[in-house]
Image: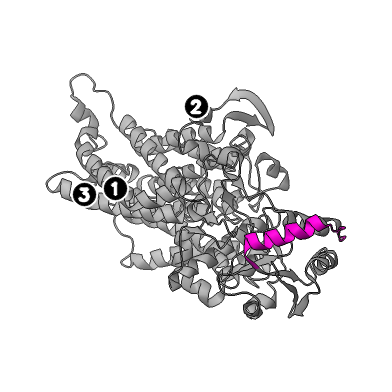
């Protein structure tokens, strides 16, 4: 009985010292179960993204096509690193002023990692692969942490891993936010912190330094995968360590000292502080050294911008959303969509059954510090996700939320409050997995009841395929290389009308050529707000406004000498080589008539009209 209890505590407390004992292996080939678990997660990722697979270049995520166009541009831009022409500030978008790559959700790490696939099959294929891969890899990473590092029953680990990978918040962020779903380095980072807390005895300092080196390297890599994920991870790990230390240190009772009181968890906060301090110090030093220049570029370099571009009050969680089921889940309904700022932000839609089961599991396992700590930190993150003012049933109240206390702090001022709930997903997954593990390995009476209750609570959250729709193909003028007869490599081609945040699809033209030419304007974040604050896009130049009016009204506007003078100034400013209008786009006849009047008759090449720029 004593041995079983010790093993259980080892599993339930991720920052406790490891003990030699562990649940006996039920199979001599655990790798087979691990492979089956990973295969099932990969299959789930493929099913969620199956709408893109019939034709990645001709299909788009219908709930967020604009961000998908931007993502594909960044994926294509990353391939320039393979020809030695990649920079963190580039004029390939928003020519000639350019953009600060790190000031945007630029997918630098993902783009470089998948660049061979992008070069071989194109950015749309890479986007589809990355969208499914991130979900499956997140689930697999947490599965291995639960099964191997924490020695949970493999069924329990699979339940926890699947929830981490395919929770409603992660599925909703898969609507063209790969920088938020690329969180598969978070489990290794969590493992480093757990291992640091377990590092005691002789040689502890050396092991802590090695773990700190690994943690710092992982944090650096995560910065380039998704900076916001790194921030949420650091915050959550810090809160979890504090909560665990508080719950694992009971007040000493009569007749026993503090060390004896702490022995029931095998954890002494004072004993782990040296190794934890060394490891975190080394990690901070390594990450600080490696990220010093990128951070300078992001916050002080060319085209950097200060302040957040999205209003925290708008991106706050509705209190009713926590008990609701996401519209992207099989059991969800469209009515719940009004409780979020958009289809990519269903971050708090955990559903009432899951919250009830987590609360019940916490009360059942209240003696286990890790379970209590995870639940407490989840509540803190939920409270932060409510934003500066609490919203109830789509109505903003006068009640201030906890986020209001942090809103002016660095980093917090740029955060979207609703996304704090994403960091709670692994914490809830740990509680659910621990409940299943305990029931399967330690209790006979609840052996069936608890797993069934957990699975039943999760079933309504099972995601359906991400909604997709057809989209216009990239003109053959670009995919078959005709453009090279009208513009030099790295020259500027002006799409007609020019891309912006409302219609960025023309950015896909450059993406189809591995960003071999520059594009004016576009959908990006730059310093074009008041006093150089962050803003979406740039104020359009006179010619861009003229072409936009022609497309919007489907009528060629009357032209003046001022329009012609502005055109030639804009051509010189953009260093434009040519203007390109795709066949069949809305307002095409009006746009063609306008440019014919400004630049003379255009040339029809493949499936576009082209006007050579004459400055």
Is 571 a magenta residue?
yes
Q: Residue furthest left?
A: 202
**Quadrant showing the N terminus:** top left
Q: How far apart, in angstroms, are the residues tagged by discs 2 and 1?
A: 28 Å
Colouring scheme applied when the structure was drawn: one colour
What residue is shown with label 2?
Answer: 405
On screen, residue 143 above or below 282? below
Residue 470 disc label:
none
State which tag comes first along the sequence, 2 or 1. 1
What residue is shown with label 3?
Answer: 209
State which tag comes first along the sequence, 3 or 1. 3
Q: In terms of secondary structure, where does tag 3 sit?
A: helix
In-image side of 291 versus 596 (left or right): left
**Relative image position of residue 46 (x, y in whole percent):** 56, 66
Q: How far apart, in angstroms, are the residues tagged by discs 2 and 3?
A: 35 Å
Q: Which residues are magenta?
A: 554-576
State which tag comes first along the sequence, 2 or 3. 3
On screen, residue 412 above or below 558? above
Q: In terms of secondary structure, where does tag 1 sit?
A: helix
Q: Residue at x 41, y 67 (%)?
A: 35
Q: Nearer the viewer, residue 331 or 562?
A: 562
Q: Nearer the viewer, residue 157 or 389?
A: 389
**Relative image position of residue 417 (x, y in whole percent):** 54, 38
Query: Can see residue 465?
Result: no
Predominant SS of the magenta segment: helix
Residue 283 disc label:
1
Tell me if label 3 and label 1 are in contact, CB under 8 Å.
no
Tell me if label 2 and label 3 are in contact, CB under 8 Å.
no
Q: Residue at x 20, y 39 (%)?
A: 274
Residue 531, quarter of the rendered image: top right
């Amino acid at each position: 009985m004593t041995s079983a209890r010790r093993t259980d505590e080892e599993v339930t407390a991720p920052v406790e010292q490891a003990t030699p004992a562990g649940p006996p292996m039920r199979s001599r080939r655990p790798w087979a179960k691990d492979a089956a678990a990973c295969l099932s997660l990969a299959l789930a990722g493929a099913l969620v993204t199956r709408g893109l697979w019939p034709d990645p270049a001709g299909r788009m995520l219908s709930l967020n096509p604009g961000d998908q166009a931007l993502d594909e541009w960044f994926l294509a831009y990353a391939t320039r690193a393979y020809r030695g022409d990649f920079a963190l500030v580039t004029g390939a978008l928003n020519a000639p002023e350019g953009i600060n790559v790190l000031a945007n959700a630029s997918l630098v790490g993902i783009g470089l990692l998948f660049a061979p696939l992008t070069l071989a099959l194109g950015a749309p294929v890479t986007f589809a692969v990355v969208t499914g891969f991130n979900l499956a890899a997140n689930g697999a990473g947490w599965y291995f942490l639960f099964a191997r590092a924490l020695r949970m029953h493999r069924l329990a680990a699979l339940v926890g891993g699947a929830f981490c990978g395919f929770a409603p918040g992660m599925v909703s962020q898969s609507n063209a936010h790969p920088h938020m779903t690329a969180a598969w380095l978070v489990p290794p980072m969590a493992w480093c912190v757990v291992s640091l807390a377990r590092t005691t005895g002789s040689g502890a300092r050396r092991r802590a330094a090695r773990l700190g080196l690994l943690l710092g390297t992982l944090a650096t890599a995560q910065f380039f995968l998704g900076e916001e994920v790194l921030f949420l991870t650091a915050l959550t790990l810090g809160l979890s360590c504090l909560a665990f230390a508080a719950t694992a240190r009971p007040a000493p009772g009569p007749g026993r000292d503090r060390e004896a009181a702490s022995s029931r968890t095998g954890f002494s906060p004072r004993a782990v502080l040296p190794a934890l301090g060394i490891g975190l110090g080394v990690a901070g030093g390594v990450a600080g050294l490696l990220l010093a220049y990128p951070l300078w570029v992001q916050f002080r370099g060319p085209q950097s911008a200060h302040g957040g571009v999205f209003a925290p009050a708008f991106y706050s969680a509705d209190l009713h959303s926590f008990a609701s089921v996401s519209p992207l889940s099989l059991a969800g309904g469209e009515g719940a969509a009004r409780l979020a700022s958009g289809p990519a932000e269903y971050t708090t839609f955990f559903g009432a059954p899951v919250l009830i089961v987590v609360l019940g599991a916490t009360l059942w396992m209240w003696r286990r510090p890790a379970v209590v700590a995870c639940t407490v930190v989840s509540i803190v993150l939920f409270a932060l996700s409510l934003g500066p003012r609490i919203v109830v049933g789509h109505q903003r109240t006068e009640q201030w939320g906890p986020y209001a206390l942090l809103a002016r702090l660095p980093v917090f001022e740029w955060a979207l409050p609703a996304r704090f709930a994403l960091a709670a997903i692994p914490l809830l997954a740990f509680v659910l997995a621990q409940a299943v593990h305990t029931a399967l390995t330690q209790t006979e009476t609840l052996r069936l009841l608890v797993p069934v209750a957990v699975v039943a609570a999760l079933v309504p959250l099972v995601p359906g395929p991400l909604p997709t729709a057809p989209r216009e193909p990239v003109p053959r003028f670009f995919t078959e290389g005709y453009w090279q007869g009208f513009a030099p490599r790295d020259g500027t081609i002006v799409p007609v009308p020019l891309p912006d945040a409302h219609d960025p699809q023309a950015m896909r033209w450059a993406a189809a050529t591995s960003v071999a030419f520059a594009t004016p304007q576009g959908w990006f974040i730059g310093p074009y707000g008041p006093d150089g604050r962050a803003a979406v896009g740039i104020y359009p130049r006179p010619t861009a406004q003229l072409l936009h009016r022609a497309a919007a009204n489907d009528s060629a506007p009357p032209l003046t000498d001022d329009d012609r003078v502005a055109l030639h100034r804009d051509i010189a400013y953009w260093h434009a080589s040519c203007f390109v209008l795709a066949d069949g786009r809305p307002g095409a006849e009006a746009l063609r008539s306008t440019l014919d009047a400004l630049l003379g008759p255009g040339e029809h090449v493949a499936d576009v009209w082209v006007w050579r720029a004459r400055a």
